[in-house]
Amino acid sequence: MGKRIITPKKAVLTNGVFIVDVELKEAAAIVHINRNTREIVEFTIEPVVKEPKPLPIPPRRILILLGAVTAVVVLAMVLTFFKLWNVAYVLSQVNSDHLIIGVGVLGVAGIAFLLYRRFRG
């Protein structure tokens, strides 16, 4: 089992034999150890099947992103309500092609940043 120290998950004494459940990196082992001689009588190692994560992004980051988007939307609504900023006027002055290009550039930059962070090391 290598040189590292392994902490058992569960141990049960049955008929003079300890039955020890051990969790390894990518497997689970059940080891039978003689109580008197402390020798391993029998062991089985079974690979643990890990289920894939349902989301590629951790839920905490999703909540932070949603909070930031909500804050920006609320700020825009407050500024528009108090007539400090007219969103419709600002957007009507921008060429629609420039908006599409801007969203595309931001999307590509965001994806490149995520891939860089994921595969950099």
Image (cartoon, rainbow, N blue to C red):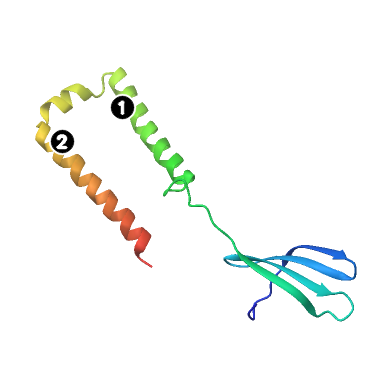
Nearer to us of marks 2 and 1 is: 2
The CA span between labels 2 and 1 is 18 Å
Rendering coords of residue 97 (x, y %): 10, 35
Quarter occupied by residue 117: bottom left
What residue is at 16 percent from the left and 23 percent from the top? 89
Rendering coords of residue 28 (x, y %): 65, 64
Q: Secondary structure at mark 1?
A: helix
Q: Which residue is mark 1?
A: 76
Q: Residues within 10 Å of mark 2 (few under 14, many from 20)?
A: few
| Residue situated in front as seen by the camera: 45 or 80 | 45
Q: Residues within 10 Å of mark 1 (few under 14, many from 20)?
A: some
Amino acid at pointer 1 = Ala
| Residue situated in front as seen by the camera: 71 or 4 | 4
Rendering coords of residue 41 (x, y %): 78, 77
What residue is at 43 percent from the left and 42 percent from the top? 62
Q: Secondary structure at mark 2?
A: helix
Q: Is residue 43 above or below residue 87?
A: below
Placement of the C terminus among the 4 image quadrants: bottom left
Quarter occupied by residue 37: bottom right
Amino acid at pointer 2 = Leu
Quarter occupied by residue 92: top left
Q: Is residue 52 above or below residue 102?
A: below
Placement of the N terminus among the 4 image quadrants: bottom right
Q: Is residue 62 above or below residue 36?
A: above
Q: Which mark is residue 99?
A: 2
| Residue situated in front as seen by the camera: 69 or 89 | 69
